[in-house]
């Protein structure tokens, strides 16, 4: 029967990038790791690692084998953590990175409820629109809203649902300029945006029947914070992309309107990312489970 320890050793060597780093992580002599991985290759009859004087790399077979070994290790760790989760009261500090708008509108009201439910847990939340490196900065969980999950491929993702975004403006702006009735009439309307390259920004809207329209424009005002841009929209400075949860009250009161109903940006995905399931402490797991339950409390994914 396959020695599961050898599969673990191989996984650690491959993910650490070498025998020395894996030996430090495991507390196992480097010579033992080298011998056990070599014996594993001998039993399998294939070469898993390509060894040179400068670096260690996976062979094609090794990359395939690593995926299965990693899944086995994570499944074993998850089984142990499932028992620990039941037996251990969540405690300790959870370090969270969260965009400003999400913190103000969605996460901020939920954190006090979570802390009341888990009195032994502390939250260290870094509220910033900056993209953080979870490993380098010691962050346990990063909350994000992105059009795609492709840039999170190296991380574990927990998907909470979609965030619907609208193109909104103040009635005063549309009275001052014009009310468009088709996408081509968006050109020339004053805009504001979170960023621009060489003074220009590009928006892509989706319409009925899968139609799309690309608008290249020169924003009158840029700020990398939607809460700040909201004031400019209300002041009639320009139209802007804005999450529906952020402009719901303004639309209900008539202070904002959809510029072109039926046309909107691609929905964003509200999700959490974290480095690995392995070794996840109960406090982090409890925080993620709490967010998932709170966000889906209605029985279906909420639109954020």
Image (cartoon, rainbow, N blue to C red):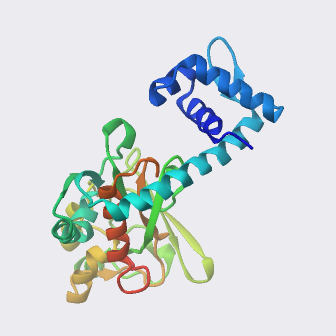
Residue depicted at 61% across the width and 77% down the height: 210
On the image, the x and y values in percent for residue 293 come to 36, 75
Front residue of 144/9: it is: 9
On the image, the x and y values in percent for residue 209 come to 62, 83
- The C terminus: image quadrant: bottom left
Front residue of 162/87: it is: 87
Q: Residue furthest right?
A: 45
The quadrant where residue 13 appears: top right
Q: Where is 4 relative to 159, above or below?
A: above
| Residue 187 seen from this side | yes
Taking the image as shown, residue 250 lies to the left or right of residue 284, namely: left
Residue depicted at 26% across the width and 84% down the height: 251
The quadrant where residue 186 appears: bottom left
The quadrant where residue 207 appears: bottom right
- The N terminus: image quadrant: top right
Q: Residue furthest front?
A: 1
Q: Where is 188 relative to 247, above or below?
A: above
On the image, the x and y values in percent for residue 118 come to 20, 65
| Residue 145 seen from this side | no
Q: How many marks?
A: 0
Taking the image as shown, residue 56 lies to the left or right of residue 295, namely: right
On the image, the x and y values in percent for residue 71 come to 61, 51
Front residue of 227/31: it is: 31
Residue depicted at 38% across the width and 71% down the height: 292
Q: Where is 43 relative to 65, above or below?
A: above
């Amino acid at each position: 029967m396959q020695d599961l320890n050898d599969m673990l050793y191989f996984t650690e060597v491959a993910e650490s990038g070498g025998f020395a780093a894996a030996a430090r992580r495991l507390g196992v002599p480097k010579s033992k790791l080298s011998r056990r991985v070599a014996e594993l290759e001998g039993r399998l009859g294939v070469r898993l690692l390509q060894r040179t004087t400068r670096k260690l790399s996976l062979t094609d077979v090794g990359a395939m084998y690593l995926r299965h070994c990693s899944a086995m290790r994570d499944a074993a760790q998850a089984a142990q953590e499932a028992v620990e989760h039941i037996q251990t009261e969540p405690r300790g500090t959870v370090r969270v990175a969260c965009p400003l708008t999400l913190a103000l509108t969605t996460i901020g009201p939920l954190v006090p409820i979570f802390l009341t439910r888990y009195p032994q847990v502390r939250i260290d939340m870094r509220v910033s629109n900056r993209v953080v490196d979870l490993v380098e900065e010691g962050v346990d969980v990063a909350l994000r809203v992105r059009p795609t999950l492709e840039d999170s491929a190296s991380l574990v993702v927990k998907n909470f649902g979609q965030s619907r975004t609208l193109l909104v403006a103040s009635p005063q702006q549309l009275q001052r300029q014009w009310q468009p009735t088709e996408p081509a009439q968006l050109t020339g309307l004053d805009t504001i945006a979170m960023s621009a390259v060489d003074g220009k920004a590009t928006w892509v809207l989706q319409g009925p029947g899968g139609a799309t329209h690309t608008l290249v424009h020169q924003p009158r005002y840029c700020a990398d914070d939607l809460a700040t841009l909201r004031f400019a929209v209300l002041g009639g400075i320009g139209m802007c992309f804005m999450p529906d949860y952020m402009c719901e009250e303004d639309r209900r009161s008539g202070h904002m309107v959809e510029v072109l109903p039926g046309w909107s940006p691609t929905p964003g995905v509200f999700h959490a990312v974290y480095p690995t399931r392995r070794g996840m402490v109960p406090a982090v797991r409890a925080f993620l489970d709490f967010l998932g339950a709170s966000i889906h409390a209605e029985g279906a994914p909420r639109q954020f």
